[in-house]
Amino acid sequence: MKKYWTYFKVTFANSFEYRGALFVWVLVELVSLCSSLFIWSGIFRNNSIVGNFQLNDMLVYYLMLPVISSITTVYVT
């Protein structure tokens, strides 16, 4: 039982090792997303259609982009 407790403590400590990097990554993603949405809202303020796209199309695209990116990104160590 002692080896499981030790394993738990080590795994728990490792999960907090990169919390600063995680916080910065989340912050950068949120700022990027908000700025993109703000820019596209400004562009569509004057025109309801740009190209073949409406504001809702662009908002859905930029909201789904981080989700699709996290699914398809491959990290090689």
Image: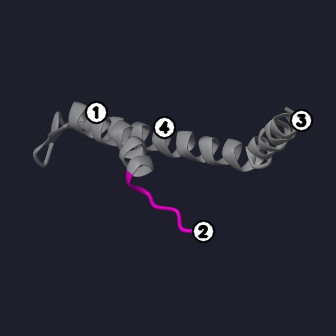
User: Which of the two marks, 2 or 4, is nearer to us in this view?
Assistant: 2
Task: Name the chief secondary structure element in magenta.
Answer: loop
User: Spatial distance from mark 3 to mark 1, Cα to Cα?
Assistant: 63 Å
Residue 18: x percent and y percent? 75, 49
Give the magenta range: 72-77
Residue highlighted by disc 2? 77
Q: Nearer the viewer, residue 65 or 16?
A: 16
User: Spatial distance from mark 3 to mark 2, Cα to Cα?
Assistant: 31 Å
Can the viewer see residue 42?
Answer: no
Q: Nearer the viewer, residue 20 or 35?
A: 20
Residue highlighted by disc 4? 34
Whether 74 is among the magenta residues is yes
Contact between labelled residues 4 and 2, with CB atoms less than 8 Å apart: no
Residue 49: x percent and y percent? 14, 39
Residue highlighted by disc 3? 2
Task: Tell me what residue is drawn at x 24 percent, y 31 percent.
Answer: 56
- Where disc 3 sits, the SS reads helix
Circle 4: residue type = Cys
Q: Residues within 10 Å of mark 4 (few under 14, many from 20)?
A: some
Residue highlighted by disc 1? 45
User: Which of the two marks, 3 or 2, is nearer to us in this view?
Assistant: 3
Can the viewer see residue 25?
Answer: yes
